[in-house]
Image (tube, rainbow, N blue to C red):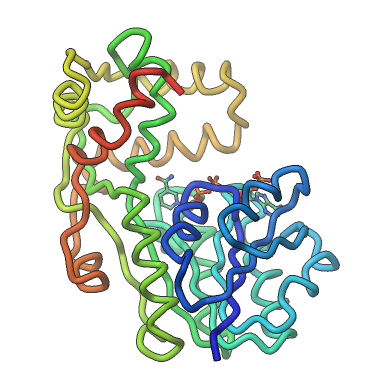
Amino acid sequence: MSRNVLITGATGTVSTLLMEALRGTDLNLRALVRDESRAAAVRERGAEVFVGDLGDPRTLPAAFEGVQDVWLLPPNGPRAPEHSSNVLWAARRAGAERVVRLSAVGSAHDAPTRSGRLHALSDHEIERSGLRWTILRPHWFMQNLLNEAGDIAGTGTFALNIGPARIGMIDARDIAACGARVLLDGPDRHHGRTYTLTGPRSVTFDEVAGDLSAALGRPIAYLPVSDDAKRKSLLDAGVPAWIADMLEEYAQAYVTGWGDFTTDAVAEILGRAPRDVASFARDHAGAFTSGR
Ligand SMILES: NC(=O)c1ccc[n+]([C@@H]2O[C@H](COP(=O)([O-])OP(=O)(O)OC[C@H]3O[C@@H](n4cnc5c(N)ncnc54)[C@H](OP(=O)(O)O)[C@@H]3O)[C@@H](O)[C@H]2O)c1
């Protein structure tokens, strides 16, 4: 019998790609959205849609009824552990068998970022949940570069406060592919495993600019800026202060070399190498040209 899987964060970056990766497979896709007006696009990806809010447990039971597998993607923010806990509780009460949880690179109680410390709380909760579980801890998403698409299209430059640091960044399509593989492999094969997912190489943003230049056929330059300058531009663009603070903590950690590593986890799960920045840049050249 095919399994029912509930996808949380269904309108976001990774879960959207995950649903694309799972479409047409044996799994029956369900998706949780918090805003009915965004349900139509999710339905088009082949999922049965339920409306619910991870911050309000009363809205969750219907989506979890009859589900065997849960994809738990906690949105960024100070309430992430509460959201994650609400999902685990709803999964337990509904008799679900397994949860696959998206965490973050370096999740630990002594992580240098608030996001890493909050993820650690939820990682430990799932490990003790009595459910089958798998944790995916991805590195910096290449898709974060799409936040710079407007500047890249308009000025041929992008500004980050990460200096000359190297990061083992990963294409979110590979995170989704790993999530899909884990879900399709059934509840036992990856139970109790925590995978730190990275791209194939640890790269600087000058090297990223080189790959963007090659993909777009015009020079693109990386402009290292101060924490204060980046923070101001994020706040001016309407990014919440908590997120701006979190991004600054990551940037400061990366500058110390904290993110300068890769792992073999993607190859272990998928049996192929992860995508590199050059292929990400080629596949998203349209966005970097139009700015959208
Ligand atoms: N970006 C990185 O480099 C990076 C690296 C490692 C780990 N991560 C982790 O990745 C996760 C974010 O993944 P993402 O970028 O794919 O997410 P995303 O694009 O920010 O999407 C977040 C999703 O969560 C939904 N959501 C927000 N609040 C909700 C609520 N109260 N109830 C129900 N749904 C809610 C959003 O729905 P709406 O459409 O309604 O807003 C959206 O579908 C975070 O846990 C982060 O720590 C990120």
Relative to the observer, which residue lies in front, 78 or 172? Answer: 172
Q: Is residue 157 above or below residue 256?
A: above
Q: Position of residue 144 (x, y in %)?
A: 39, 37
Q: Position of residue 127 (x, y in %)?
A: 50, 81
Quarter of the image for the N terminus: give it.
bottom right
Q: Is residue 213 left or right of residue 36?
A: left
Please name the residue shown 76% across and 47% down the image: 35
Q: Is residue 215 visible?
A: yes
Please name the residue shown 71% across and 69% down the image: 86
From this viewpoint, which residue is outermost toward the right? 58
Q: Is residue 125 visible?
A: no
**Count of labels shown?**
0
From this viewpoint, which residue is outermost toward the top? 155
Q: Position of residue 23 (x, y in %)?
A: 48, 64
Q: Quadrant of residue 55?
A: bottom right
Please name the residue shown 21% across and 26% down the image: 212
Relative to the observer, which residue lies in front, 110 or 191? Answer: 191
Relative to the observer, which residue lies in front, 118 or 171? Answer: 171
Q: Position of residue 187 (x, y in %)?
A: 46, 87
Q: Is residue 121 above or below residue 93?
A: above
Q: Quadrant of residue 204?
A: top left
